[in-house]
Amino acid sequence: MRRRHLLRTVRPRSLRGRLVWGAALLATVAVLAAQAIGFFVVRSWLLDRVDGQLRDFLLPDHAYSRTVGPGPVPSPAPGSVTLPSDFRVTFYDARGDEHGTLGGGSTPGPDLPSSIGRLGLSPGEPATVGSVSGDERWRVLVKSGSGRTSYVVALPLNTVDGAAAKMLWLNAIVLAATATGLVVLGRWAVRIGLLPLTRMEHTAQDITAHDLNLRLPDTDPRTETGRLSTVLNTMLDRLQRALRERESSEARLRRFVADAGHELRTPLTTIQGFAELALRHQDRPASARREADRLIAQNAERMSLLVDDLLLLAKLDQEPVYATERVDLLSLAADAVSAVAPQSPGHRIGLEPLGGGQGELEPAETTGDPHRLRQVVTNLLTNAVTHTPPRTTVRVRVGTARADTDSGGRDRPGRSASGPPLAEGTPICVVEVIDDGPGICPEAADRVFERLYRADPSRSRDQGGSGLGLAIASTITQGHGGRLELETRPAQGCVFRCVLPCG
């Protein structure tokens, strides 16, 4: 536990520290490994040179001065052979006992036993032994002499050991300088390399301080930090858009609740007032009671229709279930005209092909729920005759086209829409409801598809309508993959357009 706590204390916690010390440690280990390999290679090469000198050494026969007994007994003859200054030769007789030495010098010789058997070396195999005194080491090799005699050739290793010691000191200095340079230069390089992250950190702190319009710099796609900045900027854009949509949704919800309460309060107040009046004045004339009952029933019916529309919108928002049948919008438009025209004798209502003129009417088939799509066309036509003065001409046009800025399905200036645009060139079915009434101002046109919204006093509840007809039509159209559009200018009428993909 204590060791773990110590490691946690020593370990750097910042990314910069981990990178610097990690890189320095790896580089130090690499340099140390290279130095160790070089040291052992050079030492082995020097040792091999010494071993080669020992193997190449040959003692001439005339180095032996005499032979006595059953076998030759070596004895160095003074002046009979001259050895290099570094070589030492120790002779052993046939019995294995030491019998003289050749070579001299000021340094003590190798520490060899008095018997060849105690040396424990095989002929031709070099070995390392110590010195008679001091720390010097010798490389020795056993060779066979004349008869059964043998001798040991020795060379000092002071050159090899001296070179190895110098290499160790030099490697230590180089290693220390390398490690120090790696730490110093590594901190500088890592600080420069992490500078984009530092800027990202400062920008993120400013964004945290409620400056949501800021974006991260360094969006170079060739670097990791650039790709990270791009991803984070995309995420911030989506979060900001989601926050705006949430605020807008909350504002619409509050406005919707207030409008719904206002719409329901009016008929409820009327019903309550006439009911209390009837209870307090039971002796009122029959005509007055009938008028009160009529107003109570009218407001109750209005409130019931409003509640039904609200429930329908809630159902469409929650789990819309639409049938998938082949639907001819031309037949739906003809049914809507036949149903609405008798109820609006003051309006001139006609059915025309898309684009106007006296051409032939052609089917416009799509896939969807015929009941809901009929409701869309009926709501558009009812909206036109309800909110325009008498003697207004209302034309219903039906046909097929391709999505563009002229035929519909795409955005353009002066056009309001309830949904996203369709892809350019998509085959579409179009139902247009055109009137030459007073039109709608551009500010109101942007909100005309909102729930419980009325554009101006001429579209009041006294003239019918609760502000939910276009919202219901918009919801159903978007549920079928299309959208509603509005093009209008004050005093020049309105064009409501239902755009659906061809089935």
Image: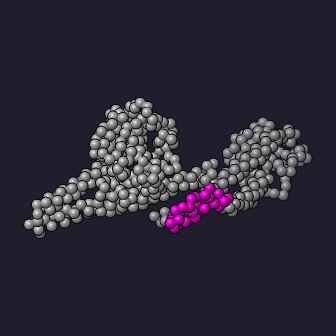
Q: Which residues are magenta?
A: 189-218
Query: Is 274 placed above or below 29 here?
Result: below
Q: Residue furthest bottom?
A: 280
In the shown orientation, is residue 3 left or right of residue 70? left
Q: Main secondary structure of the magenta part?
A: helix
In the shown orientation, is residue 385 left or right of residue 287? right
Query: Could you tell me which quadrant the N terminus lies in?
Result: bottom left
Judging from the image, the colouring scheme is one colour
Q: Percent from the top left, x then y, of residue 281?
A: 11, 68
In the shown orientation, is residue 439 left or right of residue 15? left
Query: Could you tell me which quadrant the C terminus lies in?
Result: top left
Closer to the camera in the image, 106 or 496: 496
**Quadrant of residue 264 in the image?**
bottom left
- The residue lying at 30 percent from left, 39 percent from top is 338
Numbered-mark total: 0
Closer to the camera in the image, 126 or 433: 433
- The residue lying at 35 percent from left, 42 percent from top is 349
